[in-house]
Image: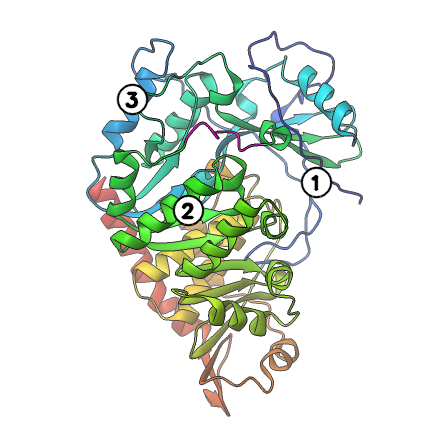
Amino acid sequence: MHNYTVTLKSPLPHHAPPSHPIFSLPLNPRQFVLPLSPQKAGGSIYHNPVFICKGTQVSVPSHGSASLGPSNGNGAAVHDWKVRSVGIENIDVATLGNLCVDIVLNVPKLPPRSREASFAYMQELSKSPPDKKYWEAGGNCNMAIAAARLGLHCATIGHVGDEIYGQFLLDVLREEGISMVGMSEDGDIVDSSNASYETLLCWVLVDPFQRHGFCSRADFCKDPAFSWMSKLTEEVKMAIKQSKILFCNGYGFDELSPALIMLALDYAVEVGTSVFFDPGPRGKSLLTGTPEEQQALSHLLKMSDVLLLTSDEAESLTGIGNPILAGQELLKNGIRTKWVIIKMGSRGSILVTMSSISCAPAFKVNVIDTVGCGDSFVAAIAFGYIHNIPLVNTLAIANAVGAATAMGCGAGRNVATLEKVIELMRASNINEDDEFWNELVKDMDTGEITFLSKMVINGRNNQVNHVALQKVVSELLPKLKDNRLEGKVAS
């Protein structure tokens, strides 16, 4: 299977008739095919992998945008809803930026590779808005929805436009019990006809050969999509201060300036909010990006409390191939760093602290779609961090949530449900590979190594402390159920 990604952007408003011949919508959304290559995704094991996504159909709210109230065309109604959302006194997790609507389409062919031709392709594509059944909340909405389904109180900090896409995104967040905090100020002049103020769209394009590409207008901008934002509003500061965790990822740089991201980071540090940072694929480009991007990346790596990376991303940032040693290097270079978590895809995951190493094999599942697995994984790490759950237990639940998402189709509202996570944990089917893990931790100079095992005979073996999965599951399930009930009562 040959897959490649083409990133584009759409600089035009999306209001033309939906009949342009450049693409065709799937005739039956229930049979829409989105085959995926077996990519690495935090916490899921690709056992007997299935790469056919049998549906991208979503349930679009029938009530339109009732939560917004009448719009005056300049964003006032949207802003009013956002301000009311800040009323939450205690937020578990707030996400920064990277709010978008994903749109999945079948196309005759993927966009050409040249920048000029791709730009022209995007202009044509943007003239034909697809039906709402092909829309889904994307970006950091994935993490927020997954966290909310674990019973955490969540807020998203960012910008959405005063148009149908922004209204759709707000409705989805509201229905999932997630608050939205707008970053624009009352005095900002918002021209709703200007693409710079529109909700960011990510077009997921699938050709007849089942290859796919991702398109966003941010990819053609020299500056971030929302570079007109330059400071934190009082509402944003309030949300950060009220949050236990502020989550940032590398894709936030596509929307927000490095200076604004650093302002948010520094304010979180000032008010005692923990910072989670997942550089993602953008980490490598930020490392060689503009001086401002390099400075912001360095600042995030040093000042974040928790870093989350794949093994490849950890190697690209440190030059060290062994994921544990790479994690220890990031810890050593950090100022506030407490945890470095390495996502090992089908192998599982690793959590490195200054005094310990925890390893958890992944759960075995039939993979339908890996989109959103890493975001779901992060949500569960936040759950463990907030509730002071033992480290190997935290990895176990994160692996389970990531794997449960992989069993569904697409991200957004299709990420793991708590019921699916509990079902997977009860099955306790993990991908044990003692030879791989023993080789990885061999000769490690650290105080404590804890390893999650399906069965434990003697417990501790030399410096490795084996913990039985069944024991971990019996400790986690009551906590998950209680937290979910508490979340429902609070909402």
Magenta span covers which residues? Answer: 223-229
Spatial CA distance of label 3 from label 1 is 44 Å
Residue 396 lies, in percent from the top left, at 46, 65
Name, please, the residue furthest toward the bottom: 462
Instruction: Name the residue rendered at 45%, 66% in the picture.
Output: 334
Q: Is residue 424 above or below residue 261?
A: below
Task: Tell me if residue 407 can be seen.
Answer: no
Spatial CA distance of label 3 from label 2 is 22 Å
Mark 3 is on which residue type? Asp
Residue 420 lies, in percent from the top left, at 45, 50
- Between 369 and 21, which is closer to the camera in this rendering? 21
Residue labelled with disc 1: 35
Residue labelled with disc 3: 186
Mark 2 is on which residue type? Met
- Between 384 and 369, which is closer to the camera in this rendering? 384
Q: Quadrant of the C terminus?
A: top left
Determine the image quadrant of residue 102: top right
Residue labelled with disc 2: 262
Determine the image quadrant of residue 161: top left
Instruction: Name the residue rendered at 66%, 30% in the picture.
Output: 8
- Between 27 and 128, which is closer to the camera in this rendering? 128
